[in-house]
Image: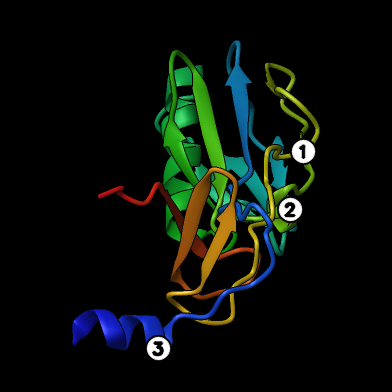
Amino acid sequence: MIYQEWVLKTKWFSAITPVNPVTATGTLTFTGTVTDGQIVIIGTEIYEFDDDSVVTGGHIAVDVSGGLTAPYAVTALVSAITNNSKIVTAVDGALDTVVVTYVSGGVVGNVSTTTTCVNGSFTTGTLTGGINGTPCPEKNTLVYATPYYYICTQEGNESDVAWERFTPATY
């Protein structure tokens, strides 16, 4: 009975190979100290290093009043992004790096990045690697693309869909 219900709810579409969305990422590396007023821009968000409580209007303060060293700048920037960003997450990476990840998958996350930090630079001028997923309008949609089957486990658009690949068992 469960099998019948599942088959009745299942829809098939053309033999494409579905893909899951991939989030864009980027790395900001610090090689030395930062100074008050230097900025980091990720998409439309502007982060300003601040050690004197004076920040340009519209900028997000990155409190470095405890120190201007690279390790302190990394910790402060990760904290500022974590507490304020609507578009990215950030983690303290290896050595003196900040690893930034767009919050949703797809090419929409391949946003521009820049900094005025003399001792800081992004690996590239954008977050990279964002890939659109194959949209699916209904959960449990099946697709066959030789030699695998794919099932849509979460309906969604190109940024939030989820597909699982499987090989049917032979009896």
Residue at 29 percent of width and 85 percent of height: 4
List the residue tagged with mark 3: 8
The numbered dot on residue 126 is 1
The numbered dot on residue 36 is none
Q: Which secondary structure, mark 3?
A: helix
Mark 3 to mark 1: distance in Å? 45 Å
Q: Disc 3 vs disc 1: Cβ atoms closer than 8 Å?
A: no
Residue at 18 percent of width and 87 percent of height: 1
Q: Earlier in the sequence, mark 3 or mark 1?
A: 3
Mark 2 to mark 3: distance in Å? 34 Å
Please give left or right for residue 135 compared with residue 85 in the image. Answer: right
Furthest residue toward front: 171
List the residue tagged with mark 2: 107
Judge whether 77 appears above or below 80 on screen: above
Q: Which secondary structure, mark 2?
A: helix
Q: Mark 1 packing: few (<14 Cα in 10 Å), some, or many (20+)?
A: some
Judge whether 48 appears above or below 7 on screen: above
Please give left or right for residue 132 compared with residue 83 in the image. Answer: right
Kindly tell me whether residue 51 is visible in this rendering.
no
